[in-house]
Amino acid sequence: MSSQNSLMQKIVSLCKRKGFVYPSSEIYGGLAGFYDYGPLGVELLNNLKRLWWKNTVHERENVYGLDGAILMHPKAWEASGHVAGFTDPLVDCKDCKSRVRPDKLEGWKLKKDNQTGNWQILEVGATKCPLCGGELIPEVRQFNILMETSLGVIEGQKTKAYLKGESCQNIYLDYKNVVESFSPKLPFGIAQIGKAFRNEITLGRFMFKTREFEQWDVEYFVQPEEADKAYKEWKEIRWNWYIKNLKLSAGNLRWRQHSNEERIFYATDAWDIDYKYPWGWDELEGLHHRGNYDLTQHEKFSGTDLKMFNEETGQKILPWIIEASGGVGRTFLALLLENYHEEEVRGRKRIYLSLPPYLAPIQVAILPLVRTDKKLTGAAQEILQALKSSFVVQYDEQGTIGRRYRRQDEIGTPFCLTVDGQTLEDKTVTVRERDSMKQIRVKIPELTSYLTPPLSLPQ
């Protein structure tokens, strides 16, 4: 087993064991491509989304937030091109009758027509079925990965609808409402963190590719002549966010430009920020120079005028769009991979997650040195009550102090406060820092001011 595969298995095990991520519907055998965030996972996930929202919306005067519905009018997906073009290629196995994606097999080269969704085989590669070893038929079928549902209660009169294939479409549909509500001047953006659903054929790799997931999107509306400048600015903004605010290593990130064949036909340019996952480089976020295609299509299909009045020229225009769209679950996984560490300390293995303190699911653990000492546990409970309105705290009195430190290290808790005999004498506690394991004494009244800077979300 390679060290990278081993790391992935350790992350999956940690997530299940410690309550970060559970397989969905596990008591019924699970449901492929779906996961639930456990008690620690939802805290990390919410911290991650809170940081993105703060940096993207709250700190920018010209970016407006949105939370759109999962179901939209079916014509919206016709306008966006998803009904016709949101396809994956599939080939059939003669023996087990399974269908697999040839573009994920060795030696295959395919080309997609992004307008029709049709795939053309350029080169045929391996024809051995990865599931049963049988022979694959080298004829490609198109499979639309939009998830269908229906609206209405009377059979035969139900309307076909789709779960969101991508989260950003709400933004285009509500763009006119935002303009009329807030009268923004170009440039301005609309941001959203929303669910999306894709009937993926190729799954695996844990949280990286799932059938239900979240995306964070910014659609930035600009004057056409300012689009190139805005695109360059947003590429820099997003790259710096992953390094400076998420603390991902620059060595584990790279830019990758879409090829002419890969880039959607209406886009001027497209780049991905890739992360170095255990299986290799793969997409974390996409930055797209989209022109005004999206608004043009929705204007055409809805019959609604979506043009904005340009005060500088005195004319109405359809703004051009710069898009930054990333996967929340993929970033969640990258954070765990980036910050998982093992080391030997005094002959014993220590596992710790070096998460940025402001993202950690538990920020402060309060540990009375002796659980049977009522004076110590009483003092610890008083500290808990004093800190819980400012931080996410956890009280732990089970096991030796060393084992409790190890438990907190493994879930990424940045600070442990040990209440001991000296606490009763001078009103101080031992503050232990997770990564370095250094310990200092801090006065109880000064704990909030000591802990607040490292636990606050960065600008």
Image: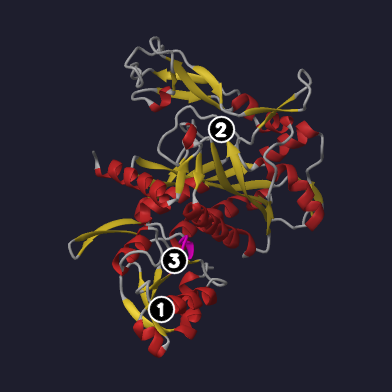
Is 440 situated above or below 457?
A: below
Secondary structure beneath label 2:
loop
Nearer to me, 244 or 417: 417
Using a 10 Å C-alpha cutoff, classify the residue at mark 1 as few (fewer than 14 neighbours), some (14 to 19) or many (20 or more): many
- The residue depicted at 68 percent of the width and 31 percent of the height is 77
Residue 115, percent from left and from top: 61, 26
Residue 413, percent from left and from top: 41, 64
Secondary structure beneath label 3:
helix
Nearer to me, 38 or 63: 38
Query: Circle 2 sits on which residue?
Result: 198
Name the amino acid, label 3: Pro
Name the amino acid, label 2: Arg
Residue 185, percent from left and from top: 74, 58
Secondary structure beneath label 1:
helix
- The residue depicted at 56 percent of the width and 45 percent of the height is 214
Q: Nearer the viewer, mark 2 or mark 1?
A: 1
Display colour scheme: secondary structure
Q: Indicate which disc, 2 or 1, sits on the residue closer to the N terminus.
A: 2
Residue 274 in sight: yes
Is 151 situated above or below 281?
A: above
Query: Circle 1 sits on which residue?
Result: 376
Distance between the Cα atoms at labels 2 and 3? 33 Å
Query: Circle 3 sits on which residue?
Result: 357
Residue range of the region highlighted in magenta in the rendering: 358-365
